[in-house]
Amino acid sequence: MCGIVGYIGRREVLPVLVRGLEGLEYRGYDSSGLACFDPEHSRIVAVKEKGKLDQLKARLEGFHHNGCIGIGHTRWATHGAPTRDNAHPHLDASEQFAIVHNGIIENYERLKTDLLRAGTHFKSETDTEVFVHTWGRLARKIRDVREAFRQTVLKCHGRFAFVGMSLKTPDRIFVFRRSNPIVIGAGSGEYFVASDVTALLPYTREVIYLEDDEMAEVLRSEVKFYNVKTGKRMQKKSIRIDWSSEQAQKGGWPHFMIKEIHEQPDVLETALAKRIQKGRIVWDTLSKKAEARLKKIRKIFAVSCGTAFHAGLAGKYMLEEYAKIPVETSVSSEFRYSDPILEKEDMVLLVSQSGETADTLAALHEAKERGAFSLALVNVVGSTLAREADAVIYTHAGPEIGVASTKAYTAQLIHLALFSIYLGKLRGKISNQNLKTLLGHAKKLPAHIRQFLVKGKAKVEECADALSDKPNLIYLGRGYNYPTALEGALKFKEITYKHAHGYAAGEMKHGPIALVDKNLPVVSIAPASKTYEKMMSNIEEVKARDGIIVSIGTRGDEKLRLKSKYFLEIPSVPEIFSCILTVIPLQLLAYQAAVLNGREVDQPRNLAKSVTVE
Ligand code: AGP
């Protein structure tokens, strides 16, 4: 999805814009551009190019400019091919107005028809261009640039963010958001605008998130906020982001993904330290009112997408075993159109790393319309889901840049495990002794992962060597590790581009076993559990048909080791925590196989880090 940056201050604007766009590259894009105010010639200069930022930088070489205000954009094509003409920014006919945009203007054809009738000439196939022409025409008519910007926004239907600038007001930038995130970073006598806080971190950690239907007029000395519907001024507070810019860089690792895999022990340690205080599980963001509501919850709907869905599915097993609350799981894209039967005693648990996934946001709106209690489990502070749900729990996994989610997933799992135990205690289902024992096991998890990342790495690399050229793999799991099978398969397929499919192991006889032959790797997640014997039967069935057996099992399990071509072992932990350990070898396996296949590990083809469109 698209990325937006803007700057106003005292610095030379070009390097600031380019650096900001570099901070957004992970979002995926196919063209880029920037526009800045050239004070010497009193004009807006726009430079844009198809392809990666290197192509844009090549066009900027020898381009000297001392302007200090500008906007930039990385485009993920929705309307019109990824060409230079379709790249943003877009200027109006007079070249006195420039705009960059993220999202979709759903009624752009009608607006375009009106403009064409008025004789407007379009240079691009984009929906965006209708905004800048409408804005320019209105501004000339009402002679008020800010009001014209506001009225233009109101003419557009859809979910989007706009950042614009005008020659008529060369000392300010105009910003608007509806559903597509925009954050403003505050410096000293300067302000930064971006789609994502990562692009601001090199300059500031004081940020202000725009909420839906809010617009801002950004000057060097201040930011004025307005409700776009009423035009009235409003006040907003800044928040401090505790991510350093270093965190958001690779720190010496070849890829963000492998760095983030190795950050998992620290992420879990942070979560455990924050959530377990004096032997109790505490939540800094849950009010007494929310806690009272949680006590009475009748049923939980865990709703999310992709990896976050797998976390929600693992949460189902956790919540049902420890909190004794029935849980129904759904992918957000199905939930939102299924006319869900929700009561106000129900809770919708929305799991999301970005907090901006369009389908999950839509699921939240379904929940709110039906009066259910909504709890968001989110990584990005201040994200839309975090701010619109009735309650939020942050996973504090730090910025996850790699498109393939890893540390955010295990952060979700540990929070879901602690939340399930907390709810169980709150509702009288867990004794003090049981709580103490469980928390004791939880505190050992970071060390277990650290140990595997050191001791298990060579075995994983050996396994990846053998599997990386296989066109198909299947992953099998049961109970808490059925979601692990789904997640392991997703990791493998999304970064190696090879087909991998996760199954509930009991389903083998209902079809998938037809796939098994001597070329098919079968990754079986079979730690000590109440379904261990059943898993062993499945592994026998695969062995009898010469399948290649890769097992994730409990340390010392000789029986499983002897049956497996590759045996990756984890320590013995209660089942609720086993899914946090068993996924680590699978993350590494996918990563190694992707590297061996020469893939774009951090930005796999066709994928975006956060799917903010349907
Ligand atoms: C996971 O590796 C994928 N990148 C993708 O499935 C992701 O989990 C999904 O898009 C949900 O994103 P969210 O957690 O930000 O809502």
Image: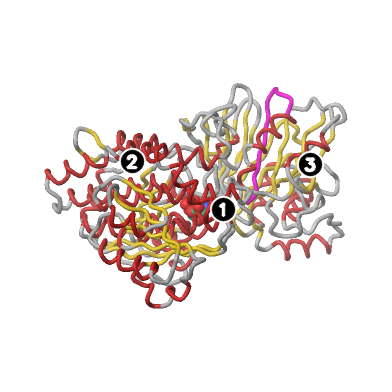
Q: Earlier in the sequence, mark 3 or mark 2?
A: 3
In which quadrant of the rendered view does residue 253 lie?
A: top right
Q: Earlier in the sequence, mark 3 or mark 1?
A: 3
Mark 3 against mark 2, which lies toward the viewer? 3
Q: Secondary structure at mark 2?
A: loop
Residue receiving disc 2: 285
Residue receiving disc 3: 55
Q: Residue at (81%, 40%) from the top-left corner?
A: 46
Indicate whether 22 appears above or below 205.
Answer: below
- Residue 460 x, y percent position in the rendering: 46, 47
- Residue 433 x, y percent position in the rendering: 11, 43
Circle count: 3
Q: Residue at (67%, 33%) from the top-left corner?
A: 19
For label 1, being within 8 Å of ligand 1 is answered no
Residue receiving disc 1: 495
Q: Amino acid at mark 2?
A: Thr
Indicate whether 425 appears above or below 517.
Answer: above
Which stretch is magenta?
1-13
Q: Earlier in the sequence, mark 1 or mark 2?
A: 2
User: How is the model colour-coded?
Assistant: secondary structure
Q: Amino acid at mark 1?
A: Ile
Q: Is residue 357 visible?
A: no
- The residue closer to the viewer here, 316 or 216, is 316
Magenta stretch: includes residue 11: yes
In which quadrant of the rendered view does residue 443 lie?
A: top left
Q: Amino acid at mark 3?
A: Gln
Counting other residues with Cα less than 10 Å from the Cα at mark 2, is it few (<14), some (14-19), or many (20 or more)?
Answer: few
Q: Secondary structure at mark 1?
A: helix
- The residue closer to the viewer here, 452 or 178, is 452
